[in-house]
């Protein structure tokens, strides 16, 4: 009786390990692809209002610094 029980349990374990519980049907897979269009806002006075005061001040300072750098480059270029 012990042998029958051991052989039966081994058979049951081996059968369960070889059989999968999940579905393996690959034909039923569904692929969903969606196209989206995104509109990009150009910088207008309205979007400039959305910027914080630090961003607006930083941009103005950058413009001034760039002007000064361009002037210095022009002065150096005139030495020829």
Image: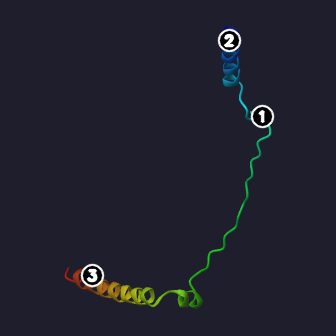
Quadrant where the N terminus sits is top right
Pair 1/2: label in front: 2
Residue matched to label 2: 7
The front one of 63 and 70 is 63
Instruction: Say which label, 3 or 1, has the lower sequence index.
Output: 1
Q: Which secondary structure lies at badge 2? A: helix
Local packing at callout 3 (Cα closer than 10 Å; few below 14, some 14-19, many 20+) is few
**What residue did someone put label 1 on?**
25
Mark 3–mark 1 distance (CA, rounded to whole Å): 70 Å
Q: Quadrant of residue 75?
A: bottom left
Label 2 crowd (10 A; few <14 / some 14-19 / many >=20): few
Q: Residue 22 or 10: which is nearer the viewer? A: 10
Q: Which badge, 1 or 2, is on the more N-terminal residue?
A: 2
Q: Which mark is residue 73?
A: 3
Q: Quadrant of residue 7?
A: top right
**Colour pattern:** rainbow
Residue found at the very far left of the displayed protein? 79
Label 3 secondary element:
helix
Query: Residue 63 placed where, x, y %?
Result: 38, 87
Callout in the foreground (3, 1): 1
Lower sequence index among marks 3 and 2:
2
Determine the image quadrant of residue 77. Answer: bottom left
Q: How busy is the neighbourhood of tag 1: few (under 14 within 10 Å), some, or many (20 plus)?
A: few
Q: Residue at x 67, y 8 (%)?
A: 3
Query: Residue lying farthest front?
Result: 1
Residue 68 locus on image (x, y percent): 30, 88
Q: Is residue 78 left or right of residue 35?
A: left
């Amino acid at each position: 009786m012990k042998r029958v029980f051991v052989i039966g349990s081994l058979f049951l374990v081996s059968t369960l390990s070889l059989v999968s519980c999940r579905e393996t049907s690959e034909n039923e897979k569904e692929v969903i692809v969606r196209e989206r269009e995104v509109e990009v806002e150009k910088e207008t006075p309205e979007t400039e209002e959305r910027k914080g005061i630090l961003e607006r001040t930083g941009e103005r300072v950058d413009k001034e610094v760039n002007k000064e750098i361009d002037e210095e480059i022009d002065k150096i270029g005139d030495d020829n």
